[in-house]
Structure formats: C-alpha cells, structure tokens
Image (cartoon, rainbow, N blue to C red):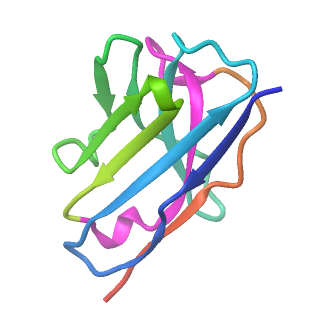
Amino acid sequence: QVQFVESGGGLVQPGGSLRLSCVASGSIDKSYSMGWYRQVPGNQRAFVAGINSVGNTKYAGSVRGRFTISRDNAKNTLYLQMDNLKLEDTARYYCHAIFYSTATPRGYDWGQGTQVTVSS
C-alpha cells in the first residue's frame, strides 16, 4: 500500500516563500516520476509541477519561474519550493506518483494534502 504524507503548508503573505515536503511510503517504485497538484474548493485538482527519475522537471504555466520541484530518492521525499507566492496560489497541495509524459496521477489513494494560504 502506497501512502503520501504532505507537510510544510501554512499562512504566508504575498511575495513570501514556503517549502512543501512529501514522504512516499509503501511499495512504490523509486523510479516513478512524482508530482505536485493543488485544489481549491469547488475545483478539480490541478497539476502544478512534476519531476522524473533523472531530474527532468515540468511546471504549470502559472507557477513556472516561481516554484521549484526536487526530490531526494534516498529519503523517498519530494519537495516544492514556492517563492514569490501570490494570492491565487492559495490551495490545498498534494503529491502523487505520476506519468511524466501526461502529468497525470498514477491512481493511488491521495494523501491529506497540506494547506497553503497566501493572504495579506
């Protein structure tokens, strides 16, 4: 059984920074690409960023240049460094194993996510 545990969210002012972390546990292939998604109430979960096994990355246009995804395979941990945060980045953020080419989730159960609120 695969589990994702996200952490690092919080309340931040516009222009601020946060670093999210995600620990993946269970029988997950360490070569899987990983990604971050976010969701606001009433909307579908949206792709934010992805990273494959060799470190190639891809981003949604709205976060490119401000967010940086990285991974530490030894620790089974995924990160999302979020800089220059904007009000519209407010959402609950989730990590998941993904198909890199399509940026779609692999279908495991979702974790609880971590809430990011950008407010002045």
Residue at 65% of width from left, 47% of height from top? 5
Residue 81 drawn in magenta: no
Residue 22 picture location, percent across and down = 54, 44
Give the magenta range. Answer: 85-105
Answer with left or right where residue 25 lies relative to residue 6.
right
Q: Quadrant of residue 3?
A: top right
Residue 116 versus residue 67 in the image, above or below? below
Residue at 16% of width from left, 44% of height from top? 65
- Between residue 11 and residue 91, name the one nearer to us: 11
Residue at 43% of width from left, 54% of height from top? 20
- Between residue 60 and residue 50, name the one nearer to us: 50
Q: What is the total number of numbered labels drawn onto the structure image?
A: 0
Q: Quadrant of residue 117?
A: bottom left
- Between residue 102 and residue 111, name the one nearer to us: 111
Residue 45 versus residue 58 in the image, above or below? below
Question: Residue lying farthest left?
Answer: 65
Residue 107 versus residue 39 in the image, above or below? above
Answer with left or right where residue 103 lies relative to residue 19.
right
Question: Residue lying farthest front?
Answer: 74
Residue at 48% of width from left, 62% of height from top? 8
The quarter of the picture where the C terminus appears is bottom left
Residue 94 picture location, percent across and down = 58, 47
The quarter of the picture where the N terminus appears is top right
Residue 39 picture location, percent across and down = 57, 54
